[in-house]
Image (cartoon, rainbow, N blue to C red):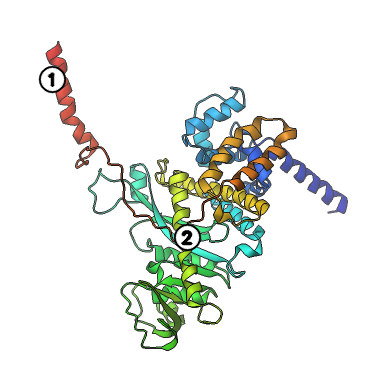
Amino acid sequence: MSARNHDSKGRRVSCQRRRLIDTAGTAWSSLLKEMGVLSRIVECLKDEVGTWRERRYGPLTTLVMFIGQVMNADQSCQDAVARETARSQGTRGTNTGSYCKARQRLPLRLIERLGPDIGERLRQKQPHHWCWRGREVKLIDGTTVSMPDTKSNQARFPQSRTQKAGLGFPVARLLAVVSLSCGAVLEWMAGPCEGKGSGETSMLWKLAGGLRSGDVVLADRYYAGYFMLARLMGCGVDIVVRQHQLRRTDFRRGKRLGKCDHLVEWPRGPRPAWMDQETYAAMPERLTLREVRVGNWIIVSSLRNVREVSRRELSDLYQQRWQVELDLRSIKSVMQMDIVRCLSPGMVVKEIAVHLLAYNLVRTAMGAAARAAELHPRRLSFKGALQLLRAYEGDLAHGPASRVGSRYDRMIRDIAANRLPHRPGRVEPRVKKRRPKSYPLMTRPRNQLRIPLTKQMDRVISLLR
């Protein structure tokens, strides 16, 4: 191919990409364009979808609408379609069927790829001083997500065994790897809550390959098993975890580094039933780890040099693990992912993926605000940032094109001004003050409970006749 033809083809692709961005539709497209991520979404869309037939809801329009849907307070499909109908001045209609089918056509791999991609781009842009001693610290934790009680969802994500059939809801387990510095979700995995390989440690075993050498992993004591620590350390990362409650710590043994601070060797235990012989043979026979007592906590770490990391610094670092609890709360409570809406397991995973993509987009705006204000993004309110994105979304989309840039800059300044108070050592009890209504719990399926009510209503109607 000649250089002239190559340049001509490149110009055609660039023109097509610009046309797709300009005609993406939905009010959120202008906001994503100003954030500098819409072009990346288009690139990933071309890689995963290739060429597509233009229709009422094309892949790009559908994806941007889906993102806006999970970002809005009302996350129903009816609200998403109503907003698009208002934008197009009523030319699309208010029926949700076409939009729901368009969401089903979106490749799951596209959305699963975009979320970590946006998070990684944010991590690469962060200043060096956001990191802990110049090193990327990754928080690991799991949670659960509920969904509608349908046969297909129950088959893929069974309800708890302690609940009777027809009385519970399907539950999915989610494991997330979150950046401590910028708060973005870098990796994640979803699956059922029961069955072989469904535990959080099994998920982390699979995601461990995505960790980079030099990273520092913060996790709670659920992940403090010998083979999990050996797996993580084999990836070239340092670990800081809390000691498992079943492991006994004796500071009279090992190499003493200070008060309640020593190096100790953990011997390899017998091969577990789930591990094959080849993997077991590759595991080290001993691990040299540092154990530190801070209050009632015993912290286990591979950061063994006491001159580089003191006991106090190790304790302060582990206390930052609580940030992942706040991040998961933001995703589940603030972004309303605690109960997803989709009726099929494939769409459930897709809805989770879009929520995490939208979460990283909010973190992208917070990162831009933090860089502009020269402060750490953990000082900014996630809920406040999401509220401002919702408020400015319509103004950016429908205002004059000449004012879009200035309005976006103002939004960034407003996000930077919405700062969290400095509250070191703050603790809150996990209790509820507001009492729920005194309705009895459901002990039988709903269709069985309707029978006596229907008979009672029929008797009342017969008496009135």
Residue 228 lies, with reference to residue 38, above or below; the image says below
Q: In the rendering, at what x and y percent does residue 100 appear?
A: 49, 35
Q: Which residue position is annotated with label 2?
A: 424
Q: Quadrant of the C terminus?
A: top left
Taking the image as shown, residue 138 lies to the left or right of residue 128, namely left
Q: Mark 2 falls on what kind of element?
A: loop
Question: For the point 22% across and 37% down, which residue is it?
Answer: 439
Question: For the point 61% across and 62% down, which residue is it?
Answer: 130
Q: Which labelled disc corresponds to residue 155?
A: none
Q: Image quarter for residue 182?
A: bottom right
The residue closer to the viewer here, 434 or 423, is 423
Q: Which residue position is annotated with label 1?
A: 459
Taking the image as shown, residue 260 lies to the left or right of residue 50, namely left
Q: In the rendering, at what x and y percent does residue 79 appear?
A: 50, 31
Q: In the rendering, at what x and y percent does residue 376 appear?
A: 59, 57
Residue 248 lies, with reference to residue 323, above or below; the image says below
Q: Mark 1 falls on what kind of element?
A: helix
The amino acid at mark 1 is Arg
Question: For the point 43% across and 71% down, which residue is it?
Answer: 241
Label 2 crowding class (10 Å Cα cut-off): few <14, some 14-19, many 20+?
few
Question: For the point 22% across and 48% down, which residue is it?
Answer: 164
